[in-house]
Image: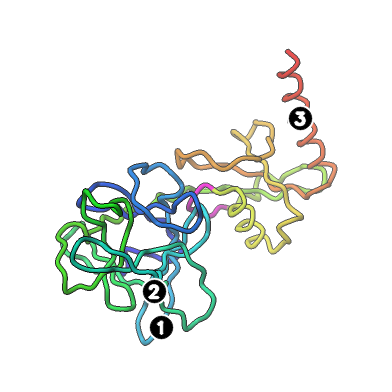
Amino acid sequence: MDFFPDRAFVRLRNRAYGTYLYADDDGAGVILKPQRGSLQTAWQVHRVWRHDRIYILLHSAAYGRYLAVSRVTTWVDTRHHANLTVQGVYETPEQDDVLWEAAYVDNVHVVMLQASHRLLRASTQNTTFFRYVFVDHPGHYYGTMMHWTQSATSARMIFYRRADDYGNVNPLSRSRCKFFGYSLLRLRAHLAMLLKEPIHRITLCVRAGSQGRPTPLVIDLPSNHQNIEIIVLTTLSPGESFAVFSALYVTVLNLVM
């Protein structure tokens, strides 16, 4: 399962319908939708060792919950029941409703095997549950409805420098790391871990080039996956206060004009 590396962000596209595994807006359901660019179609890989084998868990980049098989069954078609998939929690090491394996069926497509020896699949068209995703027994053959195309979300390179309390940075002190996804909160937590500092003590500023002025980063990262330069300031320090004040001043000035 090297094509599902730990911590990578992936999307799963159903071969039959061309739609993506999507964490529903209610934070509980899992459906199929065509919006590839949505954060709700991105899932982060979490690999675990269990029963002498490696399993993958997928947790939503949007809501943080795990792709899980529900105990609730419903009619898939006129022939039989199957279990719905949901966004679940991962509570105990022994929990198996969130465990998956991936196996190639050709050079492009995979089937997703649940730890209960069942398959992840889309529903049949023209049914009440067409948009829903089920876990079903492999004894039933559903063709391309149980095939998925896995595409990795590209990583971007983050170049970062730690500033002193007055906002000064050493031009030779630049470090770098790869980062998957768009979440500002996750980036802040990741840099805090690398710098071995509490997350609440750092403020991130983006800088467009070595001569650019730092701008406080207050929204998620852009979707273009371009490299980003970050200046890490100490929260409530004179340097951080100046950067925030400058940004607020420009914002207010634009509103007035």
Residue at the spot x=36%, y=87% of the render?
Answer: 52
Report how far apart the C-alphas of labels 1 and 3 lie in the structure: 51 Å
Mark 3 vs mark 2: which is more N-terminal? 2
3 vs 2, front mark: 2
| x and y, in percent, of residue 217 in the image | 65, 40
Circles 1 and 3, Cβ within 8 Å, touching? The answer is no
Q: What residue does disc 2 label?
A: 99
Quadrant that contains the N terminus? bottom left
Name the quadrant containing residue 196.
bottom right
Report how far apart the C-alphas of labels 2 and 1 lie in the structure: 9 Å
Question: Callout 3: helix, strand or loop?
Answer: helix
Residue at the spot x=47%, y=57% of the render?
Answer: 60
Question: Callout 1: helix, strand or loop?
Answer: strand
Q: What type is the residue that disc 1 sits on?
A: Arg
Q: What residue does disc 1 label?
A: 50
Q: What type is the residue that disc 2 sits on?
A: Leu
* Residue bounds of the magenta highlight: 176-182
Q: Camera-side residue: 120 or 12?
A: 120
Q: What residue does disc 3 label?
A: 248
| x and y, in percent, of residue 104 in the image | 21, 66
Residue at the spot x=30%, y=54% of the render?
Answer: 129
Mark 2 vs mark 1: which is more N-terminal? 1
Q: Which mark is residue 122?
A: none
Per the picture, the main secondary structure of the magenta-coloured stretch is strand
**How dense is the environment of label 3, judged by Cα within 10 Å: few (below 14), some, or many (20 and up)?**
few
Q: Camera-side residue: 157 or 252?
A: 252
| x and y, in percent, of residue 58 in the image | 42, 64
